[in-house]
Amino acid sequence: MAMQAALAEFQVESKCPVCLGKLSDPVTIDCGHNFCRLCIRQCWAQMELLSCPVCRHRCMEGHFWSNHQMERMIEMTQQLLTGPSEERRLKEKPLCEQHWQVLVHFCEDDLQLLCQRCTQHPEHQGHCVRPIKEAAADHRLKLKTRITSLNDHVRHAQQALAAQYKKCVCLGQELEDQRQQLSTESTYLKMLVEQKHNAFLAKVQKQQEHIQQQLEANEMALNNHAYHVEVLCREIAEKSKMTETKLLTNIKSTLSKCESLAPPDLHTLSFRKDACAIALQLSALQRIRKNFRVEVTLDPQTAHPNLWVSKDKKSVAFMQTEPTEPLYPMHVMDYPSILGAARFTSGRHFWEVQVEDKDAWTVCSREWHAEPGGDPPGGLRSKCEAGGAVIDRR
């Protein structure tokens, strides 16, 4: 019994003077007193001049040292004081690490297990503290509800995963079909191009042979003409050497030959490029452009006063009139111009413009740069790039 009393007295003396609980991670300060590491730090954090909470000894630099020997002695004393039955009871019921008491309460605000002394701590004052059994029963119901909700999440995730797998299979089939279609079309286009290529080469060859025949015919005609001219020249030369009587004899025939002499009719040599050009309907560029074709309407608010815009906003005409009012704020240039109503922020687009009875015109694509707080555009930059195809109807 004396040993048990001595051990109990040691247990009382080994408590922290600040929290009055079992020393947790004990440390020793300059004066020799022992405290919990966390307790002495919290005390010194509230002091301007550091001192011992027990004897008020001044601690100039606030140094302390870990007391592992005291920690082991406290553990040994606790083991000696705890009997076999008590030890089993303590193992079944977890103890508070700070006060070494059975955890019997639960703080709903901090979701933390508490012993009887913990409930008196200022940190838990005003909190909803309930007995462990009552709190456990309530949270067990909450966990069951959460399990049901989580099972729903799992089921939805599995359904989404199955839908994704089905979508992946469908997309894979579509991609394979598209690949087969592209392969077939590519083969057809290659065959078509090869056939057209051979046909165009045959046309070129036929024109070359025809031109060669015309050239040979022209050459033969020119040779015959040159021969007749030389014969006539020799005849005239011989006749000019004769006497007067012989010279004038048959002079009419000679003069008639000279007057009737004319250059031969030659074939006009030309190469018909249109007969060997690829038709526009078969042009790959034309087929590609159809995919990006858009209908562009005009914006009357950006039209110059000398421009007349149709009701459907698809055509514009120049009217030579004097402006009677200042330019509208949306007018972008002094010379006759108008912008399209459509605004393209991305992608590729193609349009056609028909121009009639004009010697000069320009089709430009432009970028707006609006100033903050202003309704009209603050800047306009013309890139004058190929934005559309112009069809001249003059």
Image (spheres, grey):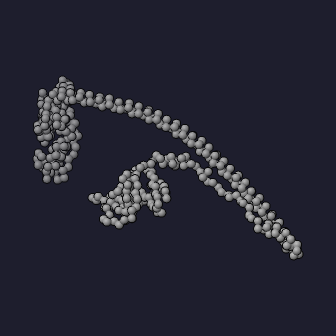
* Residue farthest along the bottom direction in this orientation: 244
Quadrant of the rendered image containing residue 338: bottom left
Q: Nearer the viewer, residue 188 or 108?
A: 188
At horizontal 46% and vertical 35% (from top left) the residue drawn is 174
Q: Is residue 172 above or below residue 344?
A: above
At horizontal 21% and vertical 38% (from top left) the residue drawn is 71
Q: Nearer the viewer, residue 111 or 145?
A: 145
Q: Position of residue 163 (x, y in %)?
A: 38, 32
Which image quarter holds the N terminus?
A: top left
Quick check: 259 left or right of 304?
right
Q: Position of residue 95 (x, y in %)?
A: 18, 31
At horizontal 20% and vertical 27% (from top left) the residue drawn is 141
Asked if one can make out residue 24 in the rendered structure from this viewpoint, the answer is yes
Total marks shown come to 0
Q: Position of residue 135 (x, y in %)?
A: 17, 29
Asked if one can make out residue 369 in the rendered structure from this viewpoint, the answer is no
Q: Position of residue 66 (x, y in %)?
A: 22, 43
At horizontal 19% and vertical 52% (from top left) the residue drawn is 61
Q: Is residue 98 above or below residue 273?
A: above
Q: Is residue 344 above or below residue 179?
A: below
Q: Nearer the viewer, residue 145 or 390?
A: 390
